[in-house]
Structure formats: C-alpha cells, structure tokens
Image (cartoon, helix red, strand yellow):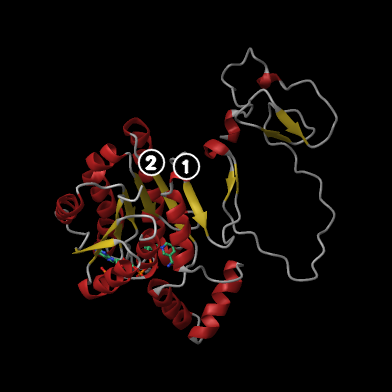
Amino acid sequence: MNNRIAIVTGASAGIGRATSLRLAKDFAGIVLVARRQEELEKTAANIKALGAEPLVLPADLRQPEAVSEIIASTKSKFGRLDAVVNIAGAVPQIHLFQMTDQQWNDGAEMKLHGARRLAIKAWPLLKESRGSVVFMSGNSAESPKPGFAAVAAINAAIVAMAKAFAEQGIIDGVQVNSILPGPVMSNRRIGFLDKWSADHQLSIDDAKEKFLQEAHIERYGKPEEVAELIAFILSPGARWLIGTAIRIDGGEIREYSFPHGMRSDHRRRRLPPQGFHPRPSRPLPPQKCPGRRPGPYILRNHLTPSLSYRSSSTTHPPPPHHSPQNPSDETGYSPSDR
Ligand SMILES: NC(=O)c1ccc[n+]([C@@H]2O[C@H](COP(=O)([O-])OP(=O)(O)OC[C@H]3O[C@@H](n4cnc5c(N)ncnc54)[C@H](OP(=O)(O)O)[C@@H]3O)[C@@H](O)[C@H]2O)c1
C-alpha cells in the first residue's frame, strides 16, 4: 500500500492542507494543487518531514486546461494515481439577490466543474489502480439560506454529481463518495464570520459564540477532523463505502429521513433550554392519506417491504392499498405521500 499516490486540491490552506498532511502518513506521494505556490511549498515541506514525497502544482481550477497538466505531471513523476481528493472551493457567500451571474459562474466553474474535470481526467489512472475519489460538499447543501444560496446549490450539485460518479465507479472499480462538513474553523470560515459579525453588529468573538448558539453545536470543527474522515474513506477498511454523502458537523443538522427521498425533515431542531421538561406526547394528527385506515403510526422498513413496525401492539387488517392485488404500491405509501 505504500506506493499509493493522492492528488489533493485546495492544499494551500485549511481543510486541504490538513488533509494533505494527514494523507502523508498513508500515501507515498501527495500532489498539492491550489493557486498560491508559496503556500503549497509550506505544505510540501511538512509533507516531506512526514516521509512522503510532495509534488507542488500551482493551478487555477477554473481553467479547463489545468486538469490535463495536473494529471500529466502526476503520471510523469509517480507513474500512478490512487486517490483524488477535491477540496478546493471558494464560492462567495453573497445574498441571493446580490450575487451576479459572473459570481455564480465563477463559483461553479471552480468547485463543481473543476472537481468534475479533474475526476474525469484522472479516471483512467484510477481505474488502473482501483482508486478513490472524494468530493467536498458542505452542510449548506441540506440547509440552504438566501445568504449563501450559491454555495448551497453548488454543494447540492456536488452530492448529486458524486453519486453519478459513484455509479460509474461501481462498474469501473473506482470508489467515490462525498463529504459534507459543518462549520470548520479555517480562513474561509473566519471570512464568513467577519461578514456575519458586521451584519449582526457584533465583535468577531461574539459572532463566533452567537453562530455556535444558533447552529446548536458545542464548537467549531477542526480541519484535522475532516482530514481524519477523508483518510478513513481512503483506507482499505472503508472500501465498501461507496456512493455515500457523509456529514461531519458536530450534530449541526438534525435529520430524520426516509430512504428514496420519500419523506424527510431537514429542519434544524432547536435544542430545548436547560431545565426544559418535554410535555407529554400529543395525539398524532389525523391521517391525510385516504387509503390508510386511522390507527397506529406505521414506519415501514423499505428494505423488507413486507415488514412494518407499529407504535402499538393493536393489530388491524392491512389497508386496501397494501394488498398484493395493488402492485402500484410496493412501498406501502399511497401516491399522495411521495
Ligand atoms: N470551513 C468550513 O466551514 C467548510 C464547511 C463546509 C465545506 N467547506 C468546503 O471545504 C473546502 C475547503 O474549505 P476551507 O474552509 O479549508 O477553505 P480555505 O481555507 O479558504 O481553502 C480553500 C482552498 O481552495 C483553494 N482554491 C480556491 N480557489 C481556487 C482555484 N480557483 N483554483 C485552485 N484552488 C483554489 C485555495 O487555495 P488558493 O487560494 O491558493 O488557490 C485553498 O487552498 C471548500 O470547498 C469549502 O466549500 C468548508
């Protein structure tokens, strides 16, 4: 395993730099990509100290031709490629009504298309090595707001694109996943908090605190924690992890979702204040689905549609749309639920 080679984009700062350093423990060579050469050189010096071989490739990933150069240089120096970690991202966090077409295009060109082009160009080498790709998304994909609509939309697109790559990867032997960090303390996050503090007329320290309270998390993530997750995804023990979108966010997003997007609740749950005592549970609202008889709440296990879990031990005959004579309802939900 010690001859493995990884490309890490965004390696000049934040999560990308932390990931490069972490992967230097598991990979023989790390290709470092970002625009600022002097910052890449700093990462490279640390990688050398950890015993891996760095290759510094300054590139602007908005330029379509940049990826050909990255792959050609990787091939000529190392002769192989085992992982592509797409971390670079600089989508501006500007209000939906203020963001220009140019800013939208620039953000997408870099974070979405830069990553897409690099993965495609790297694919033949990854097929040869049965390698891996990690795409960087973010929690905003699941919780978009007008103040950061572009990064949210691009992050959501990245999750979908990663899933499509993963499907192709199942055929070609390439493992693909995406990750969605919550607020991680990096230069990018500090830039966001600077703006946020001004908007809320707060000092930066107060803004940091207030943001945590509003996100209902205990602390900010560290770039090293995201790096550790990426190292795990790229480790041999995680090889069966395919096509997933993994959140790492200190619990910022509380989600209760059903497979296949049938029902989901992406709202953030407000944590009760200390000393809060929950009220006794209220009766369930009336059933909206006309085909389902009122009665116990049914949570269906989608993997084994013949099973259902009921909130009480009372048994009822199955409602009409559950009958095998109605093949349109394999899942047990009426069309109005979908
Ligand atoms: N920090 C968070 O809270 C958070 C949360 C969720 C997701 N993320 C995502 O994680 C990724 C890294 O974020 P970070 O917080 O570590 O930010 P960061 O410290 O600002 O790092 C961004 C990296 O992207 C590189 N980059 C920017 N534009 C580039 C371009 N045109 N071509 C090549 N490289 C470019 C930067 O290098 P150069 O400036 O040298 O080009 C830098 O290395 C981003 O995709 C971000 O959206 C971050």
Left of 302 or right of it: where is 99?
left
**Contact? badges 2 and 1 (CB < 8 Å):** yes
Label 2 sits on residue: 175
Quick check: can you spot residue 194? yes
Against 134, residue 315 (above or below) is above
Crowding near pointer 2: few (<14 within 10 Å), some, many (20+)? Answer: many
Q: Distance between the residues labelled 2 and 1?
A: 8 Å
- Tally the numbered discs: 2
The amino acid beneath tag 1 is: Leu
Q: Is mark 2 on a helix, strand or loop?
A: strand
Q: Residue at x 73, y 70 (%)?
A: 273
Residue 286 position, x and y percent, is 75, 39
Which sits earlier in the primary sequence, circle 2 or circle 1?
Answer: 2
**Which one is nearer the viewer's eye here, 256 or 53?**
53
Q: What label does residue 231 carry, if any?
A: none
Q: What label does residue 241 carry, if any?
A: 1
Residue 335's image quarter? top right
Q: Is mark 1 on a helix, strand or loop?
A: loop
**Which one is nearer the viewer's eye here, 4 or 121?**
4
Residue 107 position, x and y percent, is 29, 61
Residue 141 position, x and y percent, is 45, 55
Residue 277's image quarter? bottom right
Left of 302 or right of it: where is 185?
left
Left of 225 or right of it: where is 90?
left
Q: Residue at x 57, y 79 (%)?
A: 209
